[in-house]
Image (tube, rainbow, N blue to C red):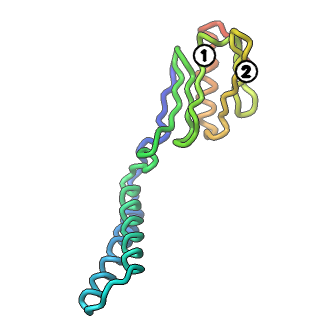
């Protein structure tokens, strides 16, 4: 049994968000075009407004198609297999990792796994940033693999 979950998987398409993005693209284009038609010089503030709105529009459109921009910055995942437990709840969070071969006991305590290693060192795996269903799945998989590997598990 194993659990692999990409926490940044693509979401649902949102027509409303795409329309908001198009709105944020059209308004500054009309603003700058109107300045040129009236033979006015576009001021630096106009260009900053144009750049800000255009960037916001592009971000909204990309998000509206279901792509998560966090994916450009890093990864967020849950990987539990027969070799290790590896958790990274967010793109800016540090990966928490422990190998099954080093474990002596594993204990679940309110949003945390306390792992005692063979060399009597301990490690804490924090689950507080995960939703309830994912925590439940993680606990199930960890309990099953621990039982398989004859590691004392207190859930």
Mark 1 vs mark 2, CA separation in Å: 13 Å
- Whole-percent x, y for residue 107 in the image: 73, 21
Quadrant in the rendering for residue 71: top left
Query: Given the current orientation, which residue lies at the most extreme bottom position?
Result: 38
Instruction: Check disc 2 and report its element: helix, strand or loop.
Output: strand
**Which one is nearer the viewer's eye here, 93 or 108?**
93
Q: Is residue 47 visible in the rendered structure shown here? A: yes
Of badges 1 and 2, nearer the viewer stands 2
Judged left or right of residue 20, residue 132 is right
Position of 32 relative to 81 (above/below): below
- Residue identifier under label 1: 144
- Whole-percent x, y for residue 53 in the image: 40, 71
Position of 39 relative to 20 (above/below): below
**Which one is nearer the viewer's eye here, 35 or 98?**
35
Measuring 39% from the left and 49% from the top, which residue is drawn there?
A: 67
Image mark for residue 107:
2
Count of labels in the image: 2
Image mark for residue 3:
none
């Amino acid at each position: 049994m194993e659990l692999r979950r990409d926490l940044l998987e693509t979401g649902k398409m949102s027509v409303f968000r795409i329309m908001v993005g198009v709105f944020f693209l059209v308004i500054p284009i009309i603003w700058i075009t109107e300045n040129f038609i009236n033979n006015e010089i576009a001021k630096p503030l106009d260009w900053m407004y144009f750049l800000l709105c255009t960037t916001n529009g592009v971000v909204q459109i990309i998000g509206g198609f279901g792509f998560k921009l966090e994916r450009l910055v890093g990864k967020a995942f849950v990987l539990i297999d027969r070799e290790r437990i590896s958790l990274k709840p967010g793109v800016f969070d540090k990966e928490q990792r422990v190998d099954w071969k080093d474990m002596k006991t594993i204990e679940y305590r309110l949003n945390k796994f306390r792992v005692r290693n063979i060399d009597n060192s301990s490690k804490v795996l924090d689950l507080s940033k995960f939703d309830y269903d994912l925590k439940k799945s993680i606990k199930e998989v960890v309990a099953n693999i621990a039982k398989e590997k004859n590691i004392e598990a207190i859930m």
